[in-house]
Image (cartoon, grey):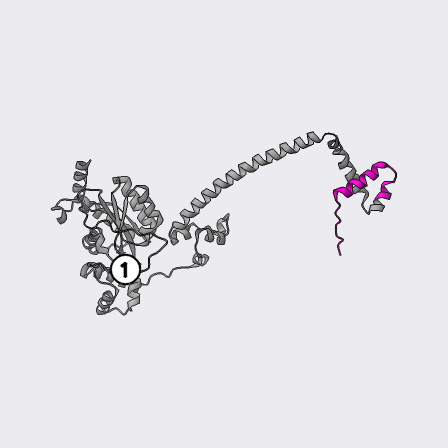
């Protein structure tokens, strides 16, 4: 059993050293008397003598301590200031992280293999995501589901955009598909497809308190000039063996497409990238209208609009008709490019869409513009306004 190490107070050491200095007893006698080692006595004596002068110059010693305390205080103030700044920056950064969509957050998590500075658990806590999501592997979409989704897209575009999931379910049954209503609803949600209602329905859904929604600002508004109103939306685009998402921004007055982006995921980055590009190339609109999808109600997207002092307008719940300009453009794109070309891969699809956008903006007559071309109207009217 190990012997417990003894500790001695300053008063005890002083008493023993003074007795040692008196010279009345030998070092061995004192060591035996106080049950300490001779080596300890020598160390205590040496330290006592080294600091003995302090007893005759208290002012100097005090001043030394004061200067040391002042230096420590100055260092402490600097550290406190740095800590305060770091805390503010950290809160700002965490706020940005939390506003990102789930898929982007997951991409930012650093694995153990990357020798991350923070543990996976702590990273997930900071970004407010469940750690189990790191290990989730989404099941690849089946060929059957892809076929059904393509048919839903065709029905929505060719037959009726007023079909909700119940009508769509009936149409699919008639087409020979074996599928339940809930599965149809799930696939339509995945595609971002919803029925266009001609009349406003009473809102019964619960609002998402994390994402603010905004009122519809286009009711009874007379749109007379470019950059007065822009609209943004996302649509499902099929390609051989899979599907993609297309985000686009249209100028309501001229029907010109100002920016677009093709992506394999329907996330916040998709819509923010398109918005930034449109503003950089064409300035800013007075009003920007979208649906109430999570991509458009995200803090990141609405902040861009607020920072540019753009009025935010959003469709009523379930009212895609409120964003009819971009809805009609997507229908035109699918009729005149997507369906007739049957693109085999993403590269072909991207090239095809790029070519159609150029044709649509600069060469295609538009009936709503008295058979003028969208970009012709946009640029001509914009010059007059300027």
Which residue shows up at 78% across the image and 43% down it?
12
Instruction: Indicate the position of residue 88 as horizontal and vertical percent values.
Output: 46, 42
109 drawn magenta: no
Q: Is residue 349 left or right of residue 53?
A: left
Q: Nearer the viewer, residue 142 or 8?
A: 8
Question: In the rendered picture of this protein, how many numbered marks are placed on residues?
Answer: 1
Secondary structure of the residue carrying tag 1 is loop
Farthest-out residue, left: 370
- Check disc 1: other Cα within 10 Å, few if <14, some if 14-19, many if 20+: few
Q: Is residue 21 above or below residue 221?
A: above
Residue 143 in view of the camera: no
Q: Residue furthest front?
A: 59
- Res. 91 in view: yes
- The reply to whether the magenta stretch includes residue 16 is yes
Question: Residue, x 43% and y 44% (percent of image)?
Answer: 92
Q: Which residues are magenta?
A: 1-30
Which corner quadrant holds the N terminus? bottom right
309 with respect to 116 (left or right): left
Question: Which residue is labeled 1 in the image?
Answer: 203
Q: Is residue 309 left or right of residue 358?
A: right
Dividing the image into 4 quarters, which one contains the C terminus?
top left
Residue 253 drawn at (x, y percent): 18, 45
Above or below — where is 22 with respect to 153? above
Residue drawn at (25%, 43%) of the image: 286
Closest to the observer, 52 or 38: 52
């Amino acid at each position: 059993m190990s012997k417990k190490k003894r500790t001695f107070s300053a008063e005890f050491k002083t008493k023993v050293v003074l007795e040692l200095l008196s010279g009345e007893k030998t070092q061995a006698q004192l060591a035996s008397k106080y049950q300490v080692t001779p080596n300890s006595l020598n160390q205590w004596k040496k330290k006592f003598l080294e600091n003995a002068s302090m007893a005759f110059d208290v002012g100097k010693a005090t001043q030394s301590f004061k200067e040391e305390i002042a230096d420590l205080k100055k260092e402490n103030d600097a550290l406190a200031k740095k800590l305060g700044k770091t805390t503010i920056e950290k809160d700002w950064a965490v706020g940005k992280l939390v506003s990102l969509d789930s898929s982007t957050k997951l991409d930012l998590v650093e694995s153990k293999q990357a020798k991350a500075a923070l543990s996976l658990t702590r990273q997930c806590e900071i970004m407010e995501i469940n750690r189990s999501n790191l290990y989730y592997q989404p099941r690849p979409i089946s060929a059957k589901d892809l076929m059904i989704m393509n048919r839903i897209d065709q029905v929505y575009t060719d037959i009726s955009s007023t079909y909700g999931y119940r009508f769509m379910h009936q149409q699919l049954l008639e087409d020979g598909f074996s599928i339940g209503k809930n599965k149809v609803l799930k696939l339509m949600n995945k595609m971002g497809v919803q029925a266009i209602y001609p009349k406003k329905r009473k809102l019964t859904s619960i609002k998402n308190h994390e994402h603010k929604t905004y009122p519809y600002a286009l009711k009874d508004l007379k749109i007379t000039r470019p950059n007065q109103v822009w609209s943004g939306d996302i649509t499902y685009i099929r390609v051989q063996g899979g599907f993609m998402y297309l985000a686009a921004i249209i100028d309501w007055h001229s029907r010109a497409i100002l920016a677009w982006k093709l992506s394999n995921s329907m996330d916040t980055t998709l819509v923010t990238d398109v918005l930034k590009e449109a503003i950089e190339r064409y300035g800013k609109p007075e009003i920007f209208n979208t649906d109430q999808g999570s991509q458009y109600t995200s803090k990141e997207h609405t902040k861009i609009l607020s920072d540019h002092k753009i009025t935010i307008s959003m469709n009523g719940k379930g009212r895609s008709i409120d964003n009819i300009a971009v809805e009609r453009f997507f229908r035109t794109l699918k009729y005149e490019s997507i369906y007739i070309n049957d693109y085999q891969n993403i590269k072909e699809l991207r090239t095809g869409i790029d070519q159609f956008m150029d044709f649509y903006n600069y060469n295609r007559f538009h009936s709503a513009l008295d058979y003028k071309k969208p970009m012709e109207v946009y640029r001509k009217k914009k010059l007059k306004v300027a």
